[in-house]
Image (spheres, grey):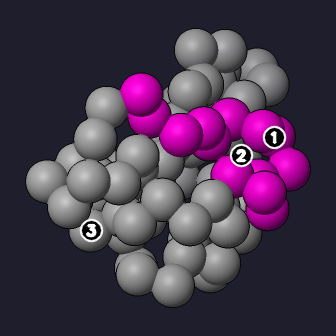
Amino acid sequence: MKKAYIEIDEERCKGCGLCINICPQKIIRFSERFNSKGYHPAEQNDPEGKCNGCGFCYMMCPDVCITVYRLAPVRGETQ
């Protein structure tokens, strides 16, 4: 079950890589695309739903580009 996910504002991201290095689940990578400023922004790559919403990426981002969403457990589902 997916516990959390992040959204990255690619236009604000300067591609410093701090979020990539700090992520304990290793689900953030550099995008192959360029943003309008010419940077490769970070993007979430989490097809298996490993994000646990720890917020390390959010706290590390100097440009406040990352929003973390934690999902409430659905009644009756086991983890």
Which labelled disc corresponds to residue 52?
Answer: 2
Position of the N terminus by quadrant:
top right
In percent of the image, x 60 and y 25: which residue is there?
A: 46
Mark 3 and mark 1 lie on one chain; the one further toward the N terminus is: 3
Q: Is disc 3 placed on a helix, strand or loop? A: loop
Vertically, is 44 above or below 10? above
In percent of the image, x 78 and y 39: which residue is there?
A: 26
Q: Is disc 1 placed on a helix, strand or loop? A: loop
Residue 59, given in percent of the width and then of the height, sits at 62, 80
Q: Which residues are magenta?
A: 20-32
Amino acid type at circle 3 is: Arg
| 6 displayed left or right of 9 | right
Vertically, is 9 above or below 2? below
| 26 displayed left or right of 34 | right
Amino acid type at circle 1 is: Gln
Query: Residue under circle 1?
Result: 25
User: Which of the two residues, 52 or 13, is positioned nearer the viewer here?
Assistant: 13
Q: Residue furthest bottom?
A: 62
Mark 2 and mark 1 lie on one chain; the one further toward the N terminus is: 1
Residue 63, given in percent of the width and then of the height, sits at 41, 81
Vertically, is 22 above or below 29? below
Which labelled disc corresponds to residue 12?
Answer: 3
